[in-house]
Image (cartoon, helix red, strand yellow):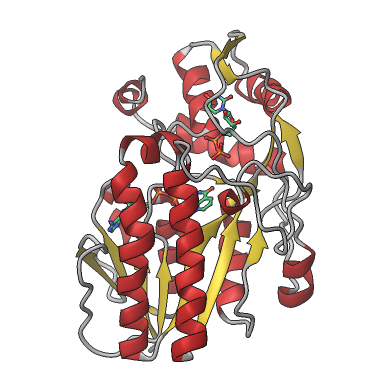
């Protein structure tokens, strides 16, 4: 059996990747320090014969006994309120953490895929964003801790590929959503659904004319899986090109949840990108991949998940 190490395993994407690799017949080692993750996301795997959990901070030396064939490095705070709260850890997990995992990959002769982000494009001046766009990032702004950690992560990964001949893959993930997102992670989908469920007004930041393009988690996981087993070492965008303004998205959530609440407007966070939409031509050509789940279907499933949470969890998520 092939062995795969998944960092950030107790998080949203990491836990879905653990499920995927178990389903595909891999031996999965999940690693997490639980800084933004939750054990409940992988509870169902704890007694699985092909799953092992290691509680560890990847910014410290990472040791794995025995053979290792693949590494997926997904550990990192991922939502703006998380990385604003823990900026130094965010920089460390993208830099020191990635360095440790590249070192491990080299020692084990494993192939490594790292989770990069559309945030490497910053507040983009090119629309939609394709992989050859270098981006527009404010290095010293509050979001810089995340964006620059991810840009460094891409650079060091390419250096290990070029200098050590390591087999590397880089996925640039665009806004992804689905069950197991944390209700209080501050990202727009858990924020709006949580507000609707608690009977609060939905908070739109800025004028709501900024856009995002939301990808359902099963599509994202499929794209990542295909990229890992492709031959392509340069970054590949994985996301859903269906773009919507935050204002229109709030209206969709009001309809979906049937809430009688209204929207209220709050200040736009600094450096919040005005527009974001992936150009996925490369993924289509290379991986024969494109998203299959519509926003309507994906949001319905996501709403069902949040609705199934206990009242206690729902109210824990109030800020
Ligand atoms: P998440 O917060 O749900 O998961 C991240 C996990 O990493 C958590 O379980 C956390 O405890 C763990 N972690 C953080 N620092 C760690 C450390 N030093 N050592 C060990 N574990 C650590 O976030 P997510 O949405 O699942 O994101 C996962 C990855 O995907 C991140 O690298 C993120 O940058 C990337 N990404 C996600 C999105 C998205 O829309 N979800 C978009 C772009 C990129
Ligand atoms: N947003 C909002 N209200 C909220 C949370 C977020 O209007 O309660 C906006 C946010 O300013 C951004 C968009 O929704 O323009 C997406 O935010 P999110 O944090 O989900 O992701 P990111 O900004 O990283 O794409």
Residue 83 drawn at (x, y percent): 38, 41
Residue 31 drawn at (x, y percent): 28, 64
Q: Residue at x 77, y 48 (%)?
A: 126
Residue 258 drawn at (x, y percent): 62, 17
Residue 151 drawn at (x, y percent): 51, 59
Q: Is residue 319 visible?
A: yes
Depicted 178 relative to depicted 27: above or below: above
Q: Nearer the viewer, residue 106 or 179?
A: 106
Q: Is residue 166 visible?
A: no
Q: Is residue 178 left or right of residue 40?
A: right
Q: Residue at x 63, y 43 (%)?
A: 298
Q: Quadrant of residue 192?
A: top right
Q: Is residue 278 left or right of residue 95?
A: right
Q: Residue at x 69, y 43 (%)?
A: 276
Depicted 121 relative to depicted 196: above or below: below
Which quadrant holds the C terminus?
A: top left
Which quadrant holds the N terminus?
A: bottom left
Q: Nearer the viewer, residue 173 or 158?
A: 158
Q: Nearer the viewer, residue 142 or 298?
A: 142
């Amino acid at each position: 059996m092939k062995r795969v190490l998944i960092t950030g395993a107790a998080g949203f994407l990491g836990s879905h990747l653990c499920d995927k690799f178990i389903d595909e017949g891999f031996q999965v080692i999940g690693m997490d320090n639980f800084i933004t993750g939750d054990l409940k996301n992988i509870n169902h795997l704890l007694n699985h014969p092909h799953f092992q959990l290691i509680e560890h901070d990847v910014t410290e030396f990472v040791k794995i006994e025995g053979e290792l064939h693949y590494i997926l490095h997904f550990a990192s705070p991922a939502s703006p309120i998380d990385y604003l709260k823990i900026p130094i850890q965010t920089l460390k997990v993208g830099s020191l953490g990635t360095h440790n995992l590249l070192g491990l990959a080299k020692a084990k002769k494993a192939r490594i895929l790292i989770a990069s982000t559309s945030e490497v494009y910053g507040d983009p001046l090119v629309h939609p964003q394709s992989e050859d766009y270098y981006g527009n990032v404010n290095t010293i702004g509050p979001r810089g801790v995340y964006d620059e950690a991810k840009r460094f992560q891409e650079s060091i990964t390419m250096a290990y590929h070029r200098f050590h001949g390591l087999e590397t893959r880089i996925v640039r993930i665009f806004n992804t959503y689905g069950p197991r997102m944390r209700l209080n992670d501050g990202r727009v989908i858990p924020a709006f659904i949580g507000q609707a469920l608690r009977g609060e007004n939905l908070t739109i930041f800025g004028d709501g004319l900024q856009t995002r393009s939301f990808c359902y988690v099963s599509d994202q996981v499929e794209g990542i899986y295909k990229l890992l087993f492709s031959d392509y070492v340069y970054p590949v965008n994985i996301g859903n090109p269906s773009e919507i303004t935050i204002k229109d998205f709030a209206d969709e959530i009001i309809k979906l949840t049937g809430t009688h609440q209204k929207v209220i407007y709050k200040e736009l966070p600094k450096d919040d990108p005005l527009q974001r939409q992936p150009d996925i031509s490369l993924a289509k050509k290379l991986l024969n991949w494109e998203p299959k789940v519509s926003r309507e279907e994906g949001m319905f499933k996501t709403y069902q998940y949040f609705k199934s949470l206990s009242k206690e969890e729902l109210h824990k998520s109030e800020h």
